[in-house]
Amino acid sequence: MSLKDQLNQDLKTALKAGDEPRKAALRVLLAAVKQAEVDRQTTLSDDEVLALLQKEAKGRRESIADAQKAERLDLVADYQRDLALIEGYLPQALGRAELTDLARAAIAEAGATDLKQLGAVMKLLTPRTKGRADGKLVNDIVRELLS
């Protein structure tokens, strides 16, 4: 079953169960998928839907930070609930220790010794962590190891 089909199936389940928050969040996600398909004039693959979900998750994280700054705890709770739902569809994230190990291996493979070779290391490391780690965190770990 494709990821898009899974989202549709979960929406049907939420509709039958009367789960309003889940139903609303799934409708937003499916609308984003549909809009991307209309924009590209093609059906999205699972990888493209996954990338879209990661983008939506990143948006929710930013919205949580903004709502916390504005002291809107009601919005924070809504965004956190949506984020938890989205993360349920994403692959398991890599921990800091796993990222550090992958970064060390990429540094050794690239033969990097200083920050000037950061690009070469990131070029090797990014495909290995795609979808399972935040790029900024990966970059910070590599910078830490190279300095």
Image (cartoon, helix red, strand yellow):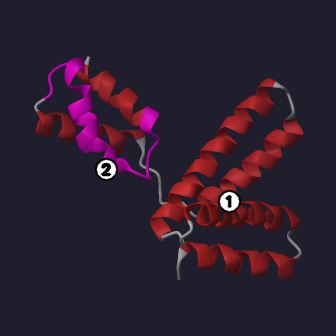
Residue 19 located within the stretch drawn in magenta: no
Which residue is found at the position 79% from the left and 32% from the top?
67
The answer to which of 29 and 143 lies nearer the viewer is 29
- The quarter of the picture where residue 103 lies is top left
Q: Is residue 59 left or right of residue 143?
A: right
Residue 127 tag number: 2
Instruction: Compute the Cα span from label 1 to label 2.
Output: 25 Å
Q: Nearer the viewer, mark 1 or mark 2?
A: 1
| Residue wearing tag 1 | 32
Amino acid identity at mark 1: Ala
Which residue is found at the position 38% from the left and 36% from the top?
138
Chain part drawn in magenta: 112-136
- The quarter of the picture where residue 115 lies is top left
Mark 1 packing: few (<14 Cα in 10 Å), some, or many (20+)?
A: some
Residue 113 located within the stretch drawn in magenta: yes
Q: Is residue 120 left or right of residue 3?
A: left
Residue 29: x %, y % from top left:
69, 61
